[in-house]
Image: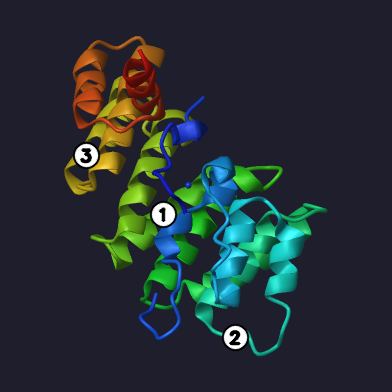
């Protein structure tokens, strides 16, 4: 549900199956609806699958069209249910009652061990972190921790660790001391091996060291630059190529 990583991202700090019908993999749309990168996705006019087509519409922030795409009763299954929940997250009116219903749907999907379940579990935490009118950092952290405990090596668990670092650095009451907050976030680095997510975590920690006026920001930012792949670096390469 994302075409890139949920990087710069870390915007909370101050994003299946094989079959005879070509499908857009779930990861391609990694949380586009949450991170505002819809403009980077081109519509796929050849999408023969209604669920895949609905994901494209969700990515383009067209929840009404996506909902219509998912309307036929014959469109069933876990991925369709996840798509419907994603549509509801991006639809108006956005009320806590509506969001609570979506959380319930996602929590049910999260009981599964497939990638749909892992993505749903991540979205539960993300909703508590940023979607409700009154965010609940503690519940968000618990959701992320449960995902990490159940699927420690999955992409979604690694993404959850990056968000968990944000919560520990800025929003959770404990640890209280800035140095302890940074130490708790740095402890997650060893568990994040996906390069772009590891880079994001270095960025989060480097910024936190600057925010808390602690030394040691530069090594994290240098490591993030070494891994590469940020939007700023891509833009810089594009400018260099046009010179």
Precedes in sequence: disc 2 or disc 3: 2
Q: Residue at x 30, y 42 (%)?
A: 197
Q: Is residue 199 above or below residue 51?
A: above
Q: Residue at x 44, y 71 (%)?
A: 116
Q: Which residue does the numbered mark 2 point to in the structure image?
A: 76
Q: Which residue does the numbered mark 3 point to in the structure image?
A: 189
Q: Residue at x 45, y 35 (%)?
A: 9
Judge the density around disc 3: few (<14), some (14-19), many (≥20) Cα neighbours within 10 Å: some
Q: Is residue 110 above or below residue 241?
A: below
Q: Residue 85: x and y, percent?
A: 63, 66
Tell me if label 3 and label 1 are in contact, CB under 8 Å: no
Inspect this view and state whether residue 71 appears.
Answer: yes
> Is 128 left, or right, of 69 in this rendering?
left
Precedes in sequence: disc 2 or disc 1: 2
Residue extending furthest right?
Answer: 93
Q: Residue 207: x and y, percent?
A: 37, 20
Tell me the element at label 1: helix
> Is 153 left, or right, of 81 in this rendering?
left
Task: Determine which quarter of the picture holds residue 199.
Answer: top left
Task: Determine which quarter of the picture holds residue 84.
Answer: bottom right
Task: Determine which quarter of the picture holds residue 216.
Answer: top left
Judge the density around disc 2: few (<14), some (14-19), many (≥20) Cα neighbours within 10 Å: few
- Report, in whole angstroms, how far the alpha carbon at label 3 lies from the one at label 1: 15 Å
Which of the two residues, 7 or 95, is positioned nearer the viewer here? 7
Q: Which residue does the numbered mark 1 point to in the structure image?
A: 144
Which of the two residues, 36 or 96, is positioned nearer the viewer here? 36
Q: Residue 166: x and y, percent?
A: 42, 35
Dot label at residue 177: none
Q: Is residue 235 above or below residue 126?
A: above
- Report, in whole angstroms, how far the alpha carbon at label 2 lies from the one at label 3: 38 Å
């Amino acid at each position: 549900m994302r075409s890139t990583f949920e990087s710069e991202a870390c915007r909370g700090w101050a994003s299946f199956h094989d079959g005879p019908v070509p499908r857009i993999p779930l990861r391609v749309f990694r949380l586009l609806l949450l991170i505002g990168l819809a403009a980077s996705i081109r519509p796929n006019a050849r999408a023969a699958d209604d669920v895949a087509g609905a994901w494209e519409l969700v990515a383009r922030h067209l929840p009404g069209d996506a909902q219509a795409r998912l309307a036929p009763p014959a469109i069933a299954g876990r991925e369709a249910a996840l798509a419907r929940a994603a549509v509801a997250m991006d639809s108006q009116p956005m009320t806590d009652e509506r969001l609570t219903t979506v959380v319930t749907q996602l929590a049910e999907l999260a009981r599964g061990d497939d990638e749909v379940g892992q993505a749903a579990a991540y979205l539960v935490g993300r909703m508590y972190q940023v979607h409700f009118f009154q965010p609940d950092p503690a519940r968000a952290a618990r959701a992320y921790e449960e995902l990490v405990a159940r699927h420690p090596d999955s992409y979604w668990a690694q993404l959850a660790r990056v968000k968990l670092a944000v919560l520990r650095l800025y929003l959770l009451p404990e640890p209280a001391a800035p140095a302890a907050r940074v130490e708790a976030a740095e402890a997650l680095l060893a568990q994040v091996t996906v390069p772009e997510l590891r880079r994001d975590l270095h960025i989060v920690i480097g910024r936190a060291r600057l925010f808390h006026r602690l030394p040691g920001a530069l090594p994290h930012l240098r490591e993030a630059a070494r891994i590469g792949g940020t939007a700023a670096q891509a833009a810089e390469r594009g400018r260099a190529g046009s010179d």
